Amino acid sequence: MMKVSFHYVPGEGFDSDDGKDKVRIYFSQDRKDERHAPTELLLLAIGSCTSDDVLSILKKMRQEFTSYRCEISGEKRDEHPRILKYAHIKYIFEGNVDADKARKAIHLSLKKYCSVSITVERGGVPVLYSLEINGKTVDDSVDVEEIKLEEEA
């Protein structure tokens, strides 16, 4: 079982306080510059979940990356409920990484292992990804649904 908690800080927003020795998270719906909005936390959750999978899979494939960065973007709808129109994950690698192996790791994560991105996608939010290796775009804005078609073919 998982459990988290937070409390309200008047005039600021919310602070996590799950009683463990975890780093506090500060968030607010009011767009405070120093606090993440809840939807930004969702994007961070997507990115961290899939990144953990992808890096683990690539290590098992003996891929030697020297650095890794993940950028996640999304846009909310104008009408209520202001849910995400899409989530876009950009995987950025430096080092000796084979594009096909990186692509396979990403596909496994997004379609089989990353519970956060799969939950979002099943909720009707398109999940897209891009892959960059050593400054070169390998894949750009691939839709998770295309991955399903590739797997079935």
Image: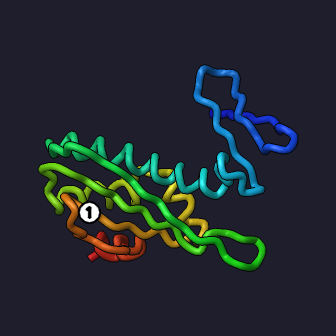
The residue beneath circle 1 is 132
Mark 1 nearby-residue class (10 Å; few <14, some 14–19, many ≥20): some
In this image, 26 relative to 105: left or right?
A: right
Q: Quadrant of the C terminus?
A: bottom left
Image coords of residue 67 (percent x, y) = 25, 45
Q: Which residue is drawn at 34% across and 71% down?
A: 147
> Which quarter of the picture shows residue 21?
top right
Name the amino acid type tagged 1: Glu
Tag 1, which secondary structure? strand
- Above or below, comparing residue 123 to residue 117 in the picture: below
Q: Which residue is drawn at 36% across and 76% down?
A: 146
- Above or below, comparing residue 14 to residue 86 in the picture: above
Image coords of residue 81 (percent x, y) = 76, 71
Image coords of residue 125 (percent x, y) = 56, 70
Q: Which residue is drawn at 27% across and 71% down?
A: 139
In this image, 122 relative to 127: left or right?
A: right
Front residue (pair 52, 134): 134
Q: Which residue is drawn at 22% across and 62% down?
A: 135
Image coords of residue 93 (percent x, y) = 25, 53
Q: Quadrant of the N terminus?
A: top right
Number of numbered discs overlaid on the protein picture: 1
Display colour scheme: rainbow
- Above or below, comparing residue 148 to residue 3 in the picture: below
